[in-house]
Amino acid sequence: MNQGNPEFQQRSVVSSFISDAGETKVALFRRSEKVNTYQHHLAPISGSIESHEIPAAAAWRELKEETTLTPRDVDLWRTGKPYTFCDPSVGRQWTVFPFLFRLKDGDEGGRGESGIQIDWEHESWEWYSPDTIQDDEKFGGVPRLKQSLRRVCFESDMNEGASKALISGLRLLKADHQSGSHELTSIALRAFRDVIAQMSEDIDGKWWETARMAAWHLWKNGRESMGAATLNAFLGLLADMEEIVHEALDRNVKWECLLALLDHHLDKRKDMPMRIKRSFGAYLECNFLPTAQSQPTPSLVILSLSASSTIRDSILEAFASLPIPNLDLRILESRPLCEGVNMASSILSAFQSRFPSSSDRHLELTVHTDASAALASKEVDFVLLGADRISDSGSVSNKTGSLPAVLSAKHVCPAAKVLVLSELEKVAEPGTESSHSHEENDPKELVGCWLQSGIKGVKMFAEGTGADRDNTNYAVEVKNIYFEWVPAELIDAYICEEGTLDASSIQEKAQQVKQKVDRYFGQL
């Protein structure tokens, strides 16, 4: 974004477009004569960002104030790259944060078009095809209307093949609620390869900008809550791509080299889990084995949750390498999708394959309810967490239930160590944890479980969540948040592909990420 211009009043605003459920049209609103600027112009839902707000929160607030739409009615579908411009006609320098919301239809629990009820700031609204929206006086839109829209509908600036590949990749990432960060990053990289494979134009400055913007969207608008790994993977890839882009090579040779590079980056990701497994084994050999061997019946006692192939494989690999006969493993079920149950089943299967009944190795595997984390923490040696994101302070965003598990273990068994097993690519650029919004997932995942279990009165409760709040004196809401933060001060060590790190090493990594983000995405 550009630096501030002292000649103009500076304002940061959100610019929120609403698409229909089929994502083929967007709603534009004609501003009334009562607003301060751009009266009678067509615009998305806009408004100032207050000093205490992050842009996404301001977007949701303005949407509700000006249309009555809430998360019941719309999904936040895309976030656009912010930009700055000056408008001398009103003496303002605007910094615009674009968003795209997708309207839910009745089958999804929304009110559809009937939910759009405009307030005094607008005279009317209509649906428009995105390709008909122009930045000219004849169209009658606010300044930079088309530019704001293209920030969230970026595929319009690409050829048809690349556009389809990007849309397909974004939809695949957004719909995947089963894969972990490592798998999602691989999906994002494969989608990016599909995009690049369609970008057969001249590989010049414009091509390079388009490629970087495609990467930015796959990071931001796939599953951003799990996107730190995707960001780092793209930053490493773009650094290697940049060298090829600026080489004096034939276009076809460059293109083939770029595709080969993408294949290489995808292939080398396969080695990362093995390196983490080795780091975990080395940590246990140094920090746990001497004490365990002094016990009459040596055991390794671990508490974990959710589903992580890295944690699963690291536990079994480390156990196999240590001269300890007993593995006591406690897994929290991890509602609503019960990923912990899936991981427990996977561990049992892998254990049976690796250690026959005739061996001297024994597994005691217990699945606990999430609410019994304190009971499951008795006499544990380690609490193992994965990570979907690691902040620059060393705090970790992981599956909801992680913080209660850690707090329970620290209280019940103060000697227990909390270890984060994660790739370094999960380290995010500097920024406060509060600026990272936790994704809100479909409450039906929870309500559906209650209905299937035949819980008394749940049908009435479920109906209450869809009640018209304007005509009732009660509000019912179901929250289904997947991730929460575990503060750095509760974490004893970070086990990664480079070995065992502490919080200061994480801080150094975050600064490196920031430098690369500024280089490859700062001027888009």
Image (cartoon, rainbow, N blue to C red):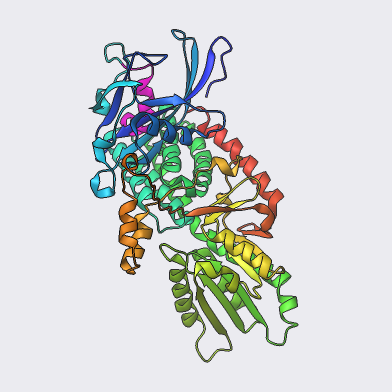
Query: Furthest-bottom residue in view?
Result: 358
Query: Which residue is located at x 28 percent, y 29 percent?
Result: 27
Residue 157 on the magenta span: yes
- Quarter of the view holding residue 387: bottom right
Does 256 sit left or right of 289 as displayed?
A: left
Magenta stretch containing residue 56, yes or no?
no
| Residue 29 % position (x, y) | 30, 23
Q: Nearer the viewer, residue 33 or 301?
A: 33
Say above or below: 126 vs 413.
above
Residue 502 visible, this orientation = yes
Q: Which residues are magenta?
A: 141-158
Compared to residue 292, the image places residue 385 above or below, namely above
Residue at the (43%, 54%) spot, across then down: 480
Horizontal side of 141 relative to 280 (left or right) equals: left
- Considering every residue shown, the one lying at the far top of the view is 89
Report the label total: 0
Residue 509 pos. (x, y %): 64, 46
Left/right of residue 400 with respect to residue 169 in the rendered view: right
Can the viewer see residue 501 in this picture?
A: no
Quarter where residue 121 is shown: top left
Where does residue 141 sit, x and y in percent of width and height? 32, 17
Q: Residue 505 placed where, x, y %?
A: 69, 50
